[in-house]
């Protein structure tokens, strides 16, 4: 019974923190919506724990806890994939920026060499 209150409490704190991060422009609206959906689902499962058994039987899974674990794994794999693609795009941007900086530094050095030769 106490885990129900704990689940609701933690979920409400997570929703508030998500909204604060969104207001500080540290989170996109899509990610805020995703996390609010997840935390509302946690609240509903905390309040109505038998609902997972109903959903599990509808999907052919035997226990509600198994359904939660499977959904958690899928969600984790989705987030890992999303983070991986973000890292890949950042690496490409960093490589491009480093190349541009190197070219600019080379141009500056060439201009300095020309100026010193003309003096």
Image (cartoon, rainbow, N blue to C red):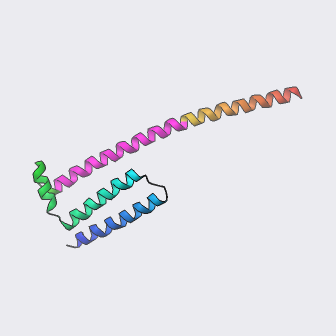
Which of 100 and 41 lies nearest the eye of the viewer? 41
Residue 79 visible: yes
Q: Taking 2 as reference, is 58 left or right?
A: left
Q: Say which residue appears at 36% left-offset and 63% top-offset.
A: 15
Classify 28 as above or below 115. below
Q: Which residues are magenta?
A: 65-94
Q: Taking 54 as reference, is 79 left or right?
A: right
Q: Say which residue appears at 26% left-offset and 49% top-offset.
A: 73
Q: Say which residue appears at 17% left-offset and 53% top-offset.
A: 66
* Horizontal and vertical percent position of residue 5: 26, 72
| Residue that extends furthest to the right in the rendered view of this protein | 119
Question: Which part of the image, by quadrant, shows the N terminus?
Answer: bottom left
Which of 81 and 18 lies nearest the eye of the viewer? 18
Residue 61 visible: no
Classify 2 as above or below 99. below
* Horizontal and vertical percent position of residue 7: 27, 67
Q: Taking 57 as reference, is 36 left or right?
A: right
Numbered disc total: 0
Asked where in the image residue 111 lies, by quadrant, the reply is top right
């Amino acid at each position: 019974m106490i885990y129900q209150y704990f689940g609701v409490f933690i979920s409400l704190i997570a929703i508030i923190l998500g909204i604060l991060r969104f207001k500080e422009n540290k989170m996109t609206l899509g990610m805020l919506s995703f996390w609010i959906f997840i935390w509302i689902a946690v609240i509903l499962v905390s309040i109505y724990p038998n609902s997972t058994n109903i959903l599990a039987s509808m999907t052919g899974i035997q226990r509600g806890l198994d359904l939660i674990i499977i959904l958690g794994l899928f969600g984790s794999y989705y987030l890992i994939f999303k983070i991986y693609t973000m890292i890949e795009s950042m690496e490409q941007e960093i490589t491009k920026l480093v190349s541009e900086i190197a070219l600019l530094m080379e141009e500056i050095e060439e201009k300095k060499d020309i100026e010193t030769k003309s003096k």
